[in-house]
Amino acid sequence: MGSTPHTRRSDTRERIQRTALDLFVARGYEKTSLREIAEQLGVTKAALYYHFKTKEDILRAISDQVGGPVDELIDWGEAQPPTPETKRELLCRYSEKLRGAVPVFRILQENQASLRALDIGGRLRERVTRLSRLMRAGDEGLDAQVRFSSALFTVHFGALALDDVMGDPEEKRLATLAVALEVLGTAAAGR
């Protein structure tokens, strides 16, 4: 069975996003042009333009691809009771959702000024704020709420902070998650 035009278009968009992300990481967002993305793909700039009008549109699509699963996680978390088990599950699932997102975070971090108008960073901040509220939900005291937030930020920033540390990315992700779960455990235990 052959592919449909929609499937081919979707595959092409994903290929463009992967190629652009690789170039944004290697050369920098500002220094990468649509022409270079098209050349790397082996297509004309007009063919690229059919799918994305600007490199900002490409980055927005990449960001949405990373953010969509996090939005689903937040929706799931908002439907759960604010128990220690829910908070543990939120951390584990969030860690999983961030797998592979480090290049996107790196681009966002390194290009904050030029990307401010796109509000990609604003959407990321809103997601983290909503996750933080979920982690702090309940009637625990201030110390516990600080630990809940610290556990979340360990997962969130851990991937980016350890990006330049030698080692397997999955091992680093799991080590970061283990530390976050330890912090969460101290909050749940009331220590």
Image: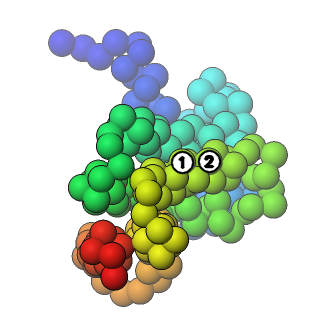
Q: Quadrant of the N terminus?
A: top left
Secondary structure type for disc 2: helix
Percent position of residue 82, x then y: 35, 49
Write the residue at 53% across / 39% down: 64
**Circle 1 crowding by C-alpha within 10 Å: few under 14, some 14–19, many from 20:** some
Q: Quadrant of residue 108?
A: bottom right
69 left or right, relative to 167: right
Write the residue at 45% across / 52% down: 137
Write the residue at 75% across / 43% down: 118
Which kind of residue does numbered mark 1 sit on? Answer: Arg
Pick the residue in front: 111 or 97.
Answer: 97
Which kind of residue does numbered mark 2 sit on? Answer: Glu
Write the residue at 56% across / 61% down: 105
Percent position of residue 9, x then y: 46, 22
**Circle 2 crowding by C-alpha within 10 Å: few under 14, some 14–19, many from 20:** few
Percent position of residue 11, x then y: 40, 30
Cβ–Cβ below 8 Å for labels 2 and 1? yes
Q: Is residue 65 above or below residue 142?
A: above
Q: Is residue 82 above or below residue 167?
A: above
Pick the residue in front: 16 or 150.
Answer: 150
Q: Which dot, 2 or 1, sits closer to the camera?
A: 1
Cα–Cα gap, marks 2 and 1 = 6 Å
23 left or right, relative to 6: right
Q: Which mark is residue 167?
A: none
Res. 127 visible in picture? yes
Res. 159 visible in picture? no
What is the number of callouts on the image?
A: 2
Residue denoted by label 1: 130
Q: Is residue 191 above or below residue 157?
A: below
Q: Which mark is residue 126?
A: 2
Q: Quadrant of the C terminus?
A: bottom left
